[in-house]
Image (cartoon, grey):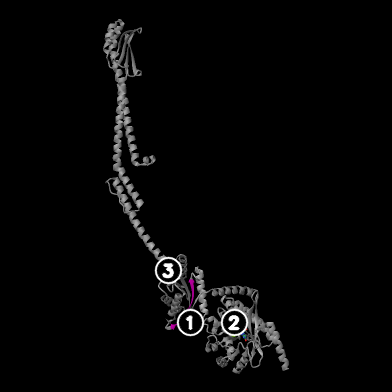
Amino acid sequence: MKLKEIFQSISIKLLMMMMGMSIFTGFLTSSILTVHEIKEAEKSDQEKIVSMANILAPNLTAAVLFNDEDTAQELINPLKGHSNIIRVQVLNSDGGVIAEVNNTGLSIQRPNHLSFMKMPLIMDSQKYGALVIQSDDSEVLKRIDFYREFLLVILGIVFMLSLILAMLLRSYFINPILYLASVADRVTKTRNYSLRAKKVSDDEVGALSANFNSMLEKMESREQDLEARVLERTTELKIANEKLHQQAYFDSLSGLPNRRYMRETLQSMLRSQAENHRHFALLFIDLDGFKEVNDTMGHDHGDILLIHAGERIQQAVRKTDLVARMGGDEFNVLLMDIESAEEVTLIAENIHRHLSESFYLHNEHVFVTCSIGITLCPEHGDTVETLIKYADLAMYEAKNDGRNCYQFFSQHMLDAALEKRRITEDLRHGINNEEFELYYQPIVDLTSGRVVKAEALIRWNHPSQGFLKPAEFIDVAEEAGLIKELGSWIATTASKKVVKMRRLVDPDFKVSINVSPSQFKGSGKWLEEWFAYMDELHLDKSAIIVEITENLLMESEESVRENLLKLRDEGISIAIDDFGVGYSSLSYLQEMDVDILKIDRSFVDNLDKDSDSIVLCRAMVRMAHHLNISVVAEGISTDIHKNKLMALGCDYGQGYLFEKPMPADIFCTKYAEVQTVELLKQA
Ligand code: C2E
Ligand code: MG
Ligand code: MG
């Protein structure tokens, strides 16, 4: 402990104060007493000598008067051997010594402490001599020494007593306080508020301990209160955290882990994969036909289907595998510890098997299948992004393969996807740079042989790849959402050209344009704008035929029907393109009031090869005519095709036998001439 700290302690302070007080009081009292005693001793010595001198003076005066030295000597002799008188002299009027006594045996202790008294010897006011007494104060000094020693003893006793008193005080008052302080210190250090101070006395210190204990009690109960509250809050927080975790990592509909959970698990799998070299597989599952269920039965039933589908997938995989819902009708499965691709195949097939059984929804048995894309780790990728992206790509490939199947990822899928992205970029530039052109292929009236219509077919003058046919970019344009922009351009361009064709070739000339299914989805604002444009051109809308696919008729989306009806209302004819290869029913043809049916090229192509095609073509022509729909046969490339179709009663023909598609200017020039020649012939 440092000196400063020592002096800060109450007991030391108390000790110092008490000792100070005691010593001061003792010192003061003893000093006053000593001084008083010394003064008294001095005074009594002096008085003794004066009274002796007074007694001797009358006789000595007579002895001096008579110069009687012997008497004088006799008179002063008794003073010899007096304790503190050193010398006595009797002097005559001349100052001569007539009698003298020297106490030679007396040792002079302190020569500077000698006192000297000279008493004149007077009679009748006449001075006859003097009595001189020299004395020694050493007695007084002895007393002083005694008192000094006495003082020291007193001080020593006072010191000891105050020390004892201080120790007693310390043990009675300071120690209990120190004890309280140590308990407080322990409470602070251990935070144990259940500790209590012992009651050491019934006095104020005892009251202090009682107060201290009641304070501790309050603190303890507050602490317990606080702890209880903290516990309550912690529990609430835990529950909230669990809820948040549940929301963040689990899909609220199916209760399955969600995309985030899957990504993080994949991430940690990849991290550990570097050390343990475990192989795993990722399955990207998309339900086939889910949208139809959602559209036709409602979202509630769609939701139930998703929940059941999730359960079935879970039943189809192993306990160690992770099934997650990534959103919509997409599920991912992480197959842990895979030995071979065959093992993955077996699980994928098992998933198909489990999903192939019907789902019972809304009192109906619903069937859905799924398309599965598979990536293997580390074979196909080593990042979360690549594994998911490639599995997704493989899943699309499975969809394109006719759905209800699985596909392992392969490099060609990635190449195709990259190619698609490139085409998309080029398409954007192409639209801005007007790199597209419409070619027109004549449609011939098979009875008269006259070219009465043409089909507008898009071509792309690609800056680096040259002349591109629609098969190379239309699908991409549709997927990239660029078809609407392109479609509007096609519609307006074809409208402009048909005005010219009506002027140069035939006033009743018609142009058919191909419209993609996605163009019919949504508000159909482009249709309004197109109609307005045709009005500006003063073009009769009967000059336009819109070719749609069979499947569009089956589209359940309300906007599709509404937009088709808009065409109908404007007097634009509707043709069903590539008829026979899609799925449509006669009732739809009738309901939508279709005008033209275009028999797909595949049937025409086979007319000269097998007998089935002719049967099918005949059925199509008959059925169309029965519904008052005219028929165009596509892809007529030989006279056999043409003759057979004519024999079947087909109305129009289109194909390389007549003409290949050509630019508008060439078309106009060519058929204007033909027209003129015909007119001339008629004339
Ligand atoms: P589609 O509407 O069935 O058009 C007929 C296709 O058959 C055209 O191919 C045409 O050149 C081709 N063709 C006609 N006669 C014959 C023949 O005798 N033999 C052979 N081998 N082919 C013949 P193209 O121009 O390559 O168009 C392919 C498809 O691309 C079109 O089939 C149509 O579905 C789509 N398409 C073309 N232009 C457009 C367009 O402007 N918009 C949209 N959305 N799709 C278009
Ligand atoms: Mg067409
Ligand atoms: Mg066609």
Pointer 1 or 2: first along the chain: 1
The correct choice, above or below, for 250 with respect to 190 in the image is below
Tell me which segment is drawn in magenta. Answer: 365-376
Determine the main secondary structure of the stretch shown in magenta. Answer: strand
Local crowd at mark 1 within 10 Å, few (<14), some, or many (≥20)?
few
Label 2 amino acid? Val
Task: Give the mark, 2 or 3, whose residue is nearer the N terminus.
Answer: 3
Alpha-carbon span between mark 1 and mark 2? 25 Å
Residue type at mark 3 is Gln
Q: Are marks 2 and 3 in contact (CB under 8 Å)?
A: no
Q: Nearer the viewer, residue 56 or 481?
A: 481
Residue annotated with mark 3: 246
Say if the magenta span includes residue 388: no
Q: CA distance from mark 3 to mark 1?
A: 32 Å
Quadrant location of the N terminus in the rendered image: top left
**Which mark is drawn over residue 109?**
none
**Residue 24 left/right relative to 509:** left
Amino acid at pointer 1 = Thr
Callout in the foreground (1, 2): 2
Is disc 1 placed on a helix, strand or loop? helix
Closer-to-camera residue (616/682): 616
The residue at label 3 has a CB less than 8 Å from ligand 1: no
Is 366 a magenta residue? yes
> Position of 359 compared to 619: left or right?
left
Query: On the image, which quarter does residue 164 sit in?
Result: top left
Label drawn at residue 515: 2
In percent of the image, x 34 and y 51: which residue is there? 187
Mark whose residue sits in front, 3 or 1: 3
Label 2 near ligand 1 (CB < 8 Å): yes
Q: As drawn, is 272 to the left or to the right of 183? A: right
Residue that mark 1 sits on: 296
Q: Label 2 to label 3, Cα distance in Å?
A: 46 Å
